[in-house]
Every structure is written in C-alpha cells, then in structure tokens.
Image (cartoon, rainbow, N blue to C red):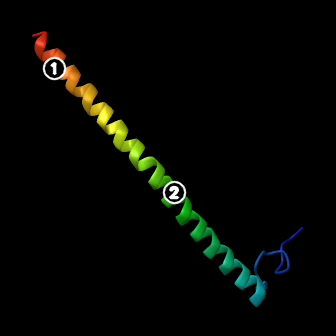
Amino acid sequence: MTLNNRHIKKSSFTPSPAHTALRRTAKVVAIIIGAVVGLVLMVILKPICRGIGWVISLISAVVIIFWLLTL
C-alpha cells in the first residue's frame, strides 16, 4: 500500500480554536502545577540537605581529630 496525502499525519489537520485553547490551558495548568511541586520540594528538601551537610561536617571533623590523635 502506497502512502498518499491522506495517510500522512498532520498534512491537512488544522486544529480548531477550541482545541488550541485547550492545549494552551493545559500547558499553563501543567506549568503552575510543576512550579507548586517544585516549591514544595524545595521547602521540604532544603532543610534536610542542610541537616545532612552538618552531619557530614561533624563526621569529617571527628575523623580528622581521630586521625590527628593517632599519628
């Protein structure tokens, strides 16, 4: 079966104004949801990462002190 213009996707497809508006609205909603999720994750994960940083610093300090005492 040979392909002609009827079989080529989007060759003569023109979206209706309602379809275009729906796509634009969906994109805006997706961007807003993504921004909210990003902010929530930042608010939750930032203190955790800071806490982990302090723990790593304390462990490093203890290891360095132990290393200096055992020379």
Q: Using a 10 Å C-alpha cutoff, classify the residue at mark 2 as few (fewer than 14 neighbours), some (14 to 19) or many (20 or more).
A: few
Splitting the image into 4 quarters, where does residue 6 fall? Answer: bottom right
Q: Nearer the viewer, residue 33 or 9?
A: 33
> As drawn, is 23 to the left or to the right of 63?
right
Q: Residue furthest bottom?
A: 17
Q: How many angstroms separate mark 1 from mark 2 (CA)?
A: 38 Å
Give the camera-side residue of 10 and 56: 56
Q: Looking at the picture, which amino acid does disc 2 mark? A: Val
- On-image quarter of the C terminus: top left
Contact (Cβ within 8 Å) of mark 1 with mark 2: no
Q: Residue at x 36, y 37 (%)?
A: 52
Q: Is residue 35 left or right of residue 27?
A: left
In the depicted structure, whether residue 35 falls above or below residue 21: above
- Residue 42 drawn above or below residue 26: above
Task: Please name the amino acid that badge 1 sits on.
Answer: Ile
* CA neighbours of label 1 inside 10 A, class few (<14), some (14 to 19), many (20+): few
Residue 26 percent coordinates (x, y): 68, 74
Secondary element type, mark 1: helix
Q: Residue at x 51, y 59 (%)?
A: 38
Q: Is residue 46 above or below residue 16?
A: above
Residue at x 49%, y 60% (from the top left corner): 39
Residue 18 numbered tag: none
> Regarding mark 2 in the picture, which secondary structure is present there?
helix
Q: Which residue is mark 2?
A: 40
* Residue at which label 1 appears: 65
